[in-house]
Image: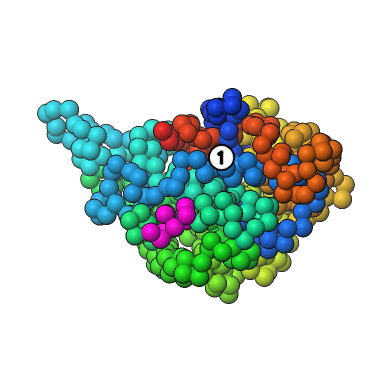
Amino acid sequence: MPSSLFRILTSIPLLLVLVLKVLDNTGGALGFTSYANDFVDPGFIVKGVFGNNTLAAQGTILQWAKDSAVGGPWSVIQKNVTAPSGDIHDYMSWAPYWWPDCSKAGNTTELTPEQIWKTCTYVSRDGKFNPDGRLINDVGNFQSLSDMVLYNSIASVLTGSGSSSYSTLAVDYIKTWFLDDETKMNPNLNYAQMQRGPTGQTGSHTGILDLKGMAKIVTGIEIFRKMNCTDWTGDLDSRMNDWTNEYIQWLESAAISLEEEAAPNNHGTFWYNQVAALKILVGDIPGALNVTNTYFAKQYMSQITANGEQASNIRGFLTNARLSAYAGDPSVWSKTTNEGSTIRTALDFAMTLNAANSNETSYTAELYPSVAAVGAIYGDPEGRYADFLAEREPTYAEEAWFLWNQPLRGGEEESKAIQGSGTASARGSQVTSLAGNKGNGARERGGVGSWVLIMLVGVGLQASFAL
C-alpha cells in the first residue's frame, strides 16, 4: 500500500506531468508544467505590482504561454467515438480502471473494439489503468485548454496591453470549446467516465472530476474582464455566462453530480472547487460564498487530523480557500477542523515526510506549489518554507507559481542576473528576453506535439496518450 506522501499527493486528482523531451527546430526543449487545479487571484495579477524577485517566474510564464498553445484549439468534437446520445458535442470519457470481461459475451468471432465497449461486461481493477481509456481524450484536451488559458491570460498582463497575441489566442480557444456552434461542448457531463458495457453507457459521479481545471479557466476570464481586454467582448461575456449558468444548473441537479458533491474525500473537495469558481464567473458572489462556506462546514471538518494527516488534498483545500477569499471571505484560512487543524497544519505534516524512505521522490515536486502558497498566505518570517524549497529545488523562483505566491523569499539572484544582462530595462522586455532563453528549466515539463502524459487520478496512476 502506498505510503503517506503518495496518499497526500495522489489520493486526489493531482495531475503530475512527466513528459518526453520535445525539440523545436533550434534544438531547444519546449515544455510547461500542468498544475491540476489552482485559482490565481485575478486582482493580484491585473494590479501588476510584482516584485523584482519574480522576473524569472515572469519569463517562465511567457514561455509556457506559447508552449501551452501548441496543439490547440481543442474541442469535444475532436474524437472518433460519439457519446451514446449520438451528439458529438457531448463531453465523453471512459472510467480509467474498468476492464472488459468478454467471457459471457456469447460471440463466435473476434469482437471489434466498438462491440467490446458495448457488449462485454466491464469490471473494476483498482489502480490498474486501462490504456484504451485515452482513445477518447476530451479530458486531456480540457486540461490543455485550462493550462493555455491560465498562462496566456497572465502573459497578456505581463506584456501590458489590452489586446495581445496572448489574449487573442486564449479568447479564440475559449470560444472554440464553449461557444462556437460547430465546436462547443454541451453544458453537461452525462457521459464522463463511463464504465462501458451493457450497463455502463452513462457517466459516473467520478467524471465530474474531469473538469477540475475549471478554476483556471475562470482565473483567465476574470483577468480579461479586470484588465478590460478588448478581445473579450461584451457579447462573448454574455454568451459565456449563459453557457455557465446552464452548466451550473446541471451540476446542482444531476444525480451523478450530487453524488460527487456528497463525497467525503477529494472528489467532494474538487466538486466545491469547480462550482464555486463557476459561481464567481457568472457574478453570483453570494452563491460562491455559500458553496465554499458549505464545504468548510462539512467535508473539510473531518479531512485533516490533529497532527496534519489529511484524507483529501492540500491543493483542493488551497483552491477552495482562495476562491472564498476572492469572493470576500478570507477567514477560512484560519478555519480549524474537528481536530483543531488548519490547512497549514496539513502542509507542515506533509513537509515532514521523507520521500526517499518510501521511494517516492518523483512525487515531491507536486508539493512545492503548496509550500509556496502556505508560506505566502500564512507568512514565513523564519524562512522555513523558503528554505524547504531552496533545499529541494534550488531554481524554484523560476517556476510559474512563484509569481502568484508572494510575498516569498527567493528569486533575487535570478532577477539580478536578468537585470545585469543589459538586454532590457522595462519589465516586459526583461521577461521576454528570459523567456526566449529559458528552455526546459529545472525539470522536464508537460510538452508540445507528441507527448506522454502521466496523470494521477483517484488512487492510482493513469497514463494518457495524446498523439
Image check: 380 left or right of 362?
right
* Disc 1: which residue: 67
Pick the residue in front: 394 or 338: 394
Extreme residue in the right direction = 382
Pick the residue in front: 413 or 123: 413
Q: Quadrant of the C terminus?
A: top left
Extreme residue in the left direction = 108
Q: Compared with residue 459, is residue 18 higher up or lower down, i.e. above or below? A: above
Q: Quadrant of the N terminus?
A: top right
Image check: 187 left or right of 369?
left
Badge 1 density bin: few <14, some 14–19, many ≥20, Cα 10 Å: many
Q: Compared with residue 53, is residue 105 higher up or lower down, i.e. above or below? A: above
In this rendering, the count of numbered labels is 1
Residue 196 rendering spot, x and y as whole percentages:
29, 44
Residue 375 rendering spot, x and y as whole percentages:
77, 50
Q: Is residue 132 magenta?
A: no
- Tell me which secondary structure the magenta stretch mostly adopts: helix
* Residue 209 visible (yes or no): no
Residue 435 rendering spot, x and y as whole percentages:
67, 39
Q: At x 59% / y 38%, what residue is drawn?
A: 32
Image check: 406 left or right of 211?
right
* Residue 343 visible (yes or no): yes
Q: At x 27% / y 54%, what residue is drawn?
A: 87
What amino acid is found at the position of numbered circle 1 in the picture?
Answer: Asp
Residue 214 rendering spot, x and y as whole percentages:
51, 56
Secondary structure under badge 1?
Answer: helix
Q: Is residue 174 magenta?
A: yes
Q: At x 39% / y 49%, what residue is drawn?
A: 75
> Magenta residues, as a range?
172-180
